[in-house]
Amino acid sequence: MKRRFPLQVHISTLFLILTLLVGGVIGGIGYKISQDILESTAAELSTRIQREVLGNFTGLLAPAEVATRLLGLDDITQQRTFEGRLSQLDFMRELLNSSSALTSLYVGYESGDFFLFRRVSEAAELKYFAAPEGTAYIVQSIEHAEGGSTGRFIYLDAALVTLRSDVRPEYAAKFDPRNRDWYTAAMRSKGQIKTPPYLFFTSGKPGTTIASRASKGGAVVGADIGLDTLNQLLAAQKVTPGTHLVLSNAAGQVIAADDFSNALPPAGQAPEPLHLPNIRDLGVPVLAQFTAASFKSDEQAAQNAVLTLDGERWHTSIRSFKLEGTNPLFLVAAIPDQELMAPAHKLMRHLVVAMLLVIALAIPATLALARRISRELQQLVGEAESIRRFEFSHPIAVDSMVLEVNELAVTMGVMKRTIRRFLDISMAVASENNFSRLLPSLLRETISAGEAEAGILYLAENDMLVQAAAMKADGGPLMAESTGLDPALAGPLLSAAIASGRAQTGRLGEADLKALGVVDSNCLPGKSHAIAVPLLNRQHNLVGAMVLFRLSETDQARLRFIEALSGSSAVSIESKELIHAQKVLFESFIQMIAGAIDAKSPYTGGHCARVPELTKMLAKAACAESSGPYKDFQLDEEGWESVHVAAWLHDCGKVTTPEYVVDKATKLESLYDRIHEVRMRFEVLKRDAEIACLQAIAAGEQAASARDRLAEQLAALDADFAFVATCNEGGEFMAAEKIERLKAIAGRTWRRTLDDRIGISHEEKARKERIPAPALPVDEPLLADKPEHRFERGVRDQMPDDNRWGFRMPPPELLYNRGELHNLGVARGTLSDEERYKINEHIIQTIIMLTQLPFPKHLRQVPEIAGGHHEKMDGTGYPKRLRREEMSPVARMMAISDIFEALTAIDRPYKKGKKLSEAIQIMATMKKAQHIDAELFDIFLRAGVYREYAERFMRPEQIDEIDIEAFVGPAAAPTAA
């Protein structure tokens, strides 16, 4: 993924790169110039060193040349004896002291004699010559006589006083001046000669010899010149500490060097023959690169080169020069690049430091400037992010000095306001669930967005435009006729907009005002322009239209915005209209179900319509509470809708309850009242008694006694039937003695002669076939619980303990038990346990049916509210045995409403509606038994809900005075709602 960085990083990086580039270029140029200057300076230094070496060399030779000329004119060249020669020591000392470079003066005679006057000052020389302490000069002499040759060393102090004299015969035998190069060269030359530099035999140090023939005789005078000072000169001329300076001859032999000591053997240990060290013997690797071929005397210009050795660069140069009477000499210089370029490197470091300092100082300024620019862009990015998150709480407040950024800020501000207004309108439309309030709200928002003075909204119904809202910008009404408007005759402007399907703007004319139904044009003073907007749905069908009245002409940008807004408005209108129609349909559907349930049985007529009203009354009273456990209880619009739907559908499960069970008025009633069968059996028994009486009389029994017995039998049968009929009514409690009397009556039999298994339904025949058919005729009990009276509970009628709804209402063993004794023996009322369960089962079916409905989110509490009105606060109710804290407040309200409505209902054929005081007394008892919510019952009384309901739905004779203070108060510890 490509990485991206903030603008300030880009700007700072660009500045840093430009600074580094410019600094690098300047540094590179400065370094190059410095390098050239240093290299040129090094070359100039080499030339200067060459001149100084040459001058120093000349300075060393000049005194020696004078000394040899003076010595050649002296009488010493004429002396033939040792003593005569010693007499000239003062003169020779003066000549020797005239130059510190002179080490010795000597005379070689044609006879082979040799006289040398040497100056010694160094400890190494004193040690070499084994000179006594205080020796300043040494005289070395060889004399040849007829008796042989004599060699001697005489050690003199500074005053030329003899300290010691040694005879050295071996010296005379080994040394002959006539065989020396200086002697032979001087004899051949007409002037002075200079020998190439060489190592002195006595000191092992480099030097040179100047010699010339004496003015008289065949002697040769010479002077030895030490070149040690050249080493010091070269050492002093080093450009850098690591510089190497060497003075050599054409053979590469070193005459002088800045560090010559390492190339020489110790004094007295020099090998024979002595020779100058080679440049390679100096132990300097870079100098070892030079060979004899490197020294070319025919080149006048310097030989400059750059060598790289072991990763180190060296600047080298070879410069030649020549003294009169000598072979060419070469000055070799080797300067390490690192040291030579140290000033350049230092300059570069200073430039780098300066550049870093500039960067260090400039980066904060650059960052500050970049941040200012990027901060504004970041603010715009934040604004864009806010727009992306649909946050429009703050306007864009960016005032940039950058023109493009400022223009972007202005454009984004306009865009943000436009989107915000569009979303505000969309949100306002979307949040309004009431269709009748939606239309004025939509028109008001559109008037504001279009900066109009007034507007009219039409809805399309049956190919006509019907006015839905008309108002001014301040919310006041706009006087306009509300009659239907034909789209083709809606005025030039609106008709053109509808025909084109696009928003149109233009000047209003009289025809437009007349067609739009504007009664008084004075209500729109100066409104000479308007925007006509057709409202088209997704299928591009006309669902409405809007006309906005403006003071001035509309620009295209606003017109496009209004057009875009109209599209959203049209979709919203269509959606809300569809939702409204669905709600109306749903409302009609639930009222149809409730009406069908009420119409199904006259015993519950109007119950499903009255319970919602009473529940809402109690809910309003609870919402109005300012103290107590219900002080925080409130219902929003969706909550009220949940209450409404749940209350209307709270008994929808009764559609599954058989009518004969709901309407069962007597104990033997099913689809019909079976007391008629029992009465017929009693009639048969009575006929049988009369027949028996007549048969007895016919057989000769006295008629009076037979008729008395018959009267007793008939009276008994009549009494028994009257008892059975009374039991069938269910108005009295069935005590044990009554049950026993029923069993006694059931002991009577009657004779059946016809087959009871023909002409009946398949299911009844199947129940009878549980036992074999008896042979006819058969005597049967007057009252019986037969096997065919037992209706088994099928699999679909079972309710497992772990059912997913949480029902805890165990069903009886049988679905129905129509046994005659079983039903007549019901202790209270007319319903058996099986029938009581079947009636109570309606709440189970209510919950199951409502749970299966795909209620929207705000109505998902409907099954809980509708299914809880038979629960009791102590957990003994049904079908889930919920306790108070497990029920919602509205469910507890509906329980109270259901009970109160049932007690006071006047449309129940099986009972009379109770008076207000009676109903309150019964419910107060239920409150104490914790069957109903005590706090809600108190609100029911204190807020006068009972009386408000009574005045609307109860008969005047039912409404009596009641002292509510006798019933208000906690029945148990107060609990939260």
Image (cartoon, helix red, strand yellow):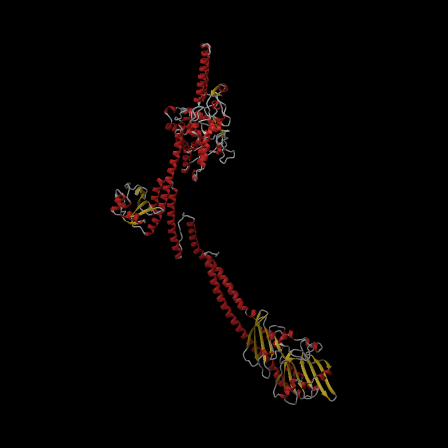
State left or right for residue 845 relative to residue 489.
Answer: right
- Residue 679 or 729: which is nearer the viewer? 679
State left or right for residue 901 relative to residue 43.
Answer: left
Question: Furthest residue to the front?
Answer: 699
- Residue 363 or 114: which is nearer the viewer? 363
- The quadrant holding residue 58 is bottom right
- Residue 379 or 179: which is nearer the viewer? 379
Q: How many marks?
A: 0
Question: Which percent across, then down, holds residue 905?
Answer: 40, 27
Asked if residue 345 is positioned above or below residue 693 in the image, the reply reads: below
Asked if residue 405 is positioned above or below residue 832 in the image, the reply reads: below
Question: Furthest residue to the right?
Answer: 147
Question: Which percent across, then down, holds residue 579?
Answer: 38, 41
- Residue 82 or 601: which is nearer the viewer? 601
Question: Furthest residue to the left?
Answer: 510
Q: Can residue 934 be seen from the camera position used here?
A: no
- The quadrant holding residue 949 is top left
Q: Can residue 677 be seen from the camera position used here?
A: yes
Question: Which percent across, then down, holds residue 918?
Answer: 42, 24
Question: Which percent across, then down, holds residue 843?
Answer: 45, 32
Asked if residue 646 is positioned above or below residue 230 in the image, the reply reads: above
Question: Furthest residue to the bottom?
Answer: 217
Residue in the image at 74% along x and 87% along y: 148
Asked if residue 375 is positioned above or below residue 656 in the image, the reply reads: below
